[in-house]
Amino acid sequence: MQPLANVTPLKPPPRAGAIEVRNVGQVFRTRSQDVVALEDVSLDIKPGRFVVLVGPSGCGKSTLLMMMAGLRAQTSGTITINGAPIPQPDPDRVGVVFQEPSLFPWLTAEDNVEFPLALRGVAKAERRAKAQDALKLVGLEGFGKRHPHELSGGMKQRVSIARGLVQDPPVLLMDEPFAALDEQTRMTMGDELLRIWAATGKTVVFVTHSLTEAVYLADEVIVMSPRPGRIVDHLQVSLPRPRTYEMLSGDAFGALRDRIWRHIRKSA
Amino acid sequence: MSAKTLRHLIVVGLIVLWELLPRSGMIPELFLPSLSSTLLAGWNEAGEYGHALAVTIYEVAVSMAFACGGGILLGAIVGSLPRPRLLIMPMVSSLYAVPLVILYPVFTVWLGIGSESKIAFASIYGFLPTMLATAAGIQTIDPQLLLAARSMGATLGQRLVRVIIPAAIPTVLSGLRVGGALVIVGVVVSEMLISSAGIGYLISRYRTILDSPHVFAGVLLVLFMAIAFNTAIRWIERRAAIWQTGMRAGQNAADEIGSGAMQPAT
């Protein structure tokens, strides 16, 4: 095929890690009635951004994340990642981290991290090398031989993050990953995640209940309304990076946090 | 003194009592022959006992294959599919309460008094707990693990081999332990009821002629069989379920590692 030197494409090809959500709706059909979980959600996430989804319980933010992961089909609308739809999970494009670390208890930490690679038949040596890199990235070098029951809650979640990163996908989706952790561990893990994000340049979509966590981590915060879930606000968080603990008590931080809280209180 | 040495001491003590009490005349030989006369009786009829043991072990092995194979297979189907579960589980659960030994005379009519009827009875006897445990094991798998596997691109087959089977192993093994023990019970009991060979048959025959040493020699052999089975199962459990060491061990390990490991590693 000849290169079409003089033709500029109408639309530039999306860079790795772009997420487009167009008019997405989700209806759960139960025996007695149809429940509209999400209604007409549209969203553009640029590569490398840290985007946080917040909203009251049952606003469909986790559902939206599951659809971005290819784990659930939307009732209407389209979702593309890197410009292509995601009808089923694709660990080359999207890594997922759940609230529960969901580690396989019969595997060691490194075998857990290697799991997605083993599924695709990657050779043992390459698998091991990638798993070691991922464990090192999350600060767990030297803990690879331990089983999950020998790790603390925060360490388990680190393994889970390493597993989401091991195939180097451009997008990392995180569904309330720190919700089950205690406050101190949660703060530490937030800083850790920002460090990993800065080091890897991935697009992160992060679901949380915590407004403080949302503002602290995000470039952008998407606020959703209760069922049927819609986007009610889209905030840019222009606080400088790296984020520090002192910012939590600053005016700018408080203003952003209040704005989100007003949306949520209105809908509660 | 550790619990283990104490346990060993108790066993040794019982063995010594077994020898001393009948010998001193405190217990009549008819009720409990001394250990030495029991062993002697067994030794003198070694050929007969050996043959009977071979028959019993054969029946146990075949029954165990049926009970465990069938139990695991059907348990897996029932555990993973809701429709057969609704259909079969209530039947199986109520069947579990029936003393299945009432079926044995029927089996002897159908299959004769040879090994076949014992195998049929013991297989069914051991099948039920194995199946129930397998079904429970499959049902109680954390759905979050399956979701995580799916998010990593696992196909249905990969989820079965890499998630469902390893996750179900501990529960299935506990079912095998109960099922296997019941298979031994089933074989020996059916041999004692209507039979022409096997350890149970020997015990029953010597009992009718009040030959206690020979009865107890048979009892000892059954005892050894049960111990051997238990040891084998425990060995398998240790091999297959190293991760099952529980929450407490995990907590200790986390404390041991300490807070230093939780600092951001930059």
Image (cartoon, coloured by chain):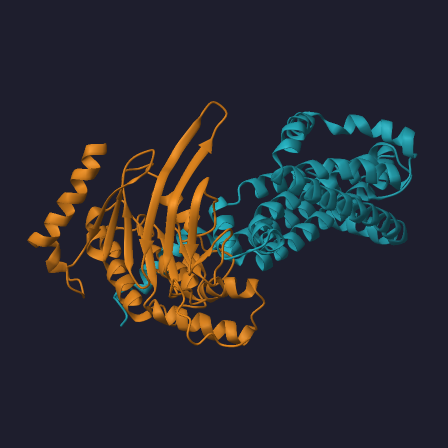
Chain colours: A orange, B cyan
**Is residue B78 visible in this depiction of the protein?**
yes
Pick the residue in front: A160 or B22: A160
Q: Is residue B167 left or right of residue B128?
A: left
Q: Residue furthest left?
A: A251
Q: Position of residue A112 (x, y in %)?
A: 48, 62
Quadrant into which the N terminus of chain A falls: bottom right
x, y percentage for residue B195?
Answer: 89, 36
Quarter holding residue A60: top left
Q: Quadrant of residue A230?
A: top left
In-front residue for pair B128/B229: B128
Q: How many labels sit on residues?
A: 0
Farthest front residue? A6
- The one nearer the camera, B35 or B180, is B180
Q: Is residue A4 left or right of residue B46?
A: left
Q: Position of residue A84 (x, y in %)?
A: 46, 57
Q: Is residue B138 left or right of residue B100?
A: left
Q: Is residue A96 above or below residue B182?
A: below
